[in-house]
Image: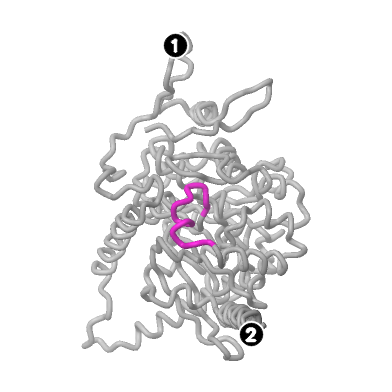
Amino acid sequence: MSVACGMECVVVLGCMRWVWRRCTYIGSNDSATWSSATPDEFDPVPRICRLILAVYEPDLHNPHFIPTVGFRPNPDWVVKRVTYEQTLGHAPPYLIYVDHDHKELVLAIRGLNLVKESDYKLLLDNKLGMQMFDGGYVHRGLLKSAIWLLKEEGETLKRLWLENGSNYDMVFAGHSLGSGVATLLTVIVVNHRDWLGGIPRRKVRCYALAPARCMSLNLAVKYADVIYSVVLQDDFLPRTATPLEDIFKSIFCLPCLMFLVCLRDTFIPEGRKLRDPRRLYAPGRMYHIVERKFCRCGRFPPEVRTAIPVDGRFEHIVLSCNATSDHGIIWIEREAEKALLRMKEESSSETVTTAPKIQKLERLQTIEKEHKDALERAVSLNVPHAVTSNEEAPEDQKPEKAPEIENQSEDAADTKLKSTGGRARWDDLVEKLFKKESGDVLLTRDSNPPE
């Protein structure tokens, strides 16, 4: 009897300890050891948020969501706006914007629309480990959407970049569902830069706001030099390893799902998670906006922390009443703007006789070193398909030539990709990534981008 009572006490104490640890875990714990971001590297984020908000606006001349203070998109610089009726469910609505002030070509993609069936179809077009791409696993539906978007807008982007003297940066941005499309679109572009006029890799960037988990860990680290994810405090989506299709099947019972996922992940060892090649992660370099503290009411002046984490990449669900509200693009824009203003104020408070805390060149070197260290750590942790920076030649040093279809026979003249092929080159990429069975077009299970 006494033994049974003792066992019951141990179980009760263990459960109480688990409940205490889970309920007291806050979003800021994920980035407690990260370094602070600088104003220069974080400066584009509020501006990108407003360009994504512009996709939601019915009339850019009289916007409802974009704040009246600060940057506002110029309606005359909007090259193209595409709605659900025009995408036919292949991708979320988006716009193409030429920012002449900042010398950027921006393709901004909106997030999930809860009343649009086409968005759910895109999310549900996936199963864990279903689609392999570029040596890792990605979300199949988001990859298909990215390929469709490039097929539609590839020539427009190329034309705009060449018309502006080949000096503008090409920026892909998205929120939530759109972040996954923008991320995989960026991966394709940096591997086929000659198809967009030979744009250098350093001029391609992607901003994923409230990012979806859309690629395996080796790809998330590999492309951290061009993909930047922005997470607001307790946002649930970057932390939920449950496949997107299961999350949004349960969108109306999301708190229950989050609790069950939290309970399940407690018993999964960290090493097992890292060694699972099918497990998807939030992409690229992470920027974490922290504005709340434990057992404190209200919001504090936000701070931005950044790193390229390998282990501990937002692996813990935060049981917070703000887990869903922190996913909203409007809140992300507000807090990002506040954080940037705070960083600029702290920077300007330094006197002219005081050297800046972090020099620009020093920060650039630090960013490069962090990426290299992250790649090496991924290899040391035996992350599947991970490679070090020394095992791959820098992208800007790789010969810029169009890829060719393997196993060419009598149709070689028709299937060979040429750098002057125009829109047909995107069709060739689609043929490379897809295969036909019984008249249906299906993604191949093992289609890597040609080298």
Which residue is label 1 attached to? 409
* Count of numbered badges drawn on the protein: 2
* Residue 175 among magenta residues: no
**Residue 49, located in which quarter of the rendered image?**
bottom right
Q: Which residue is drawn at 31% across and 44% down?
A: 395
Identify the mark nearer the N-term, 1 or 2. Answer: 2
Q: Is residue 168 visible?
A: no
Magenta part of the chain: 268-280
**Residue 391, located in which quarter of the rendered image?**
top left
Q: Which residue is drawn at 29% across and 57% down?
A: 372
Q: How crowded is mark 2: few (under 14 residues within 10 Å), some or many (20 or more)?
A: few
Which residue is label 2 attached to? 2
Relative to residue 406, is residue 80 drawn left or right?
A: right
Model colouring: one colour
**Marks 1,2: beta carbons within 8 A:** no
**Residue 346, located in which quarter of the rendered image?**
bottom left
Q: How crowded is mark 1: few (under 14 residues within 10 Å), some or many (20 or more)?
A: few
Q: Which amino acid is tagged 1? A: Ser
Q: Give the image location of residue 415, x and y in percent.
A: 47, 19
Q: Distance between the residues labelled 1 and 2?
A: 79 Å
Q: Which of 95 and 283 is in front in this view?
A: 283
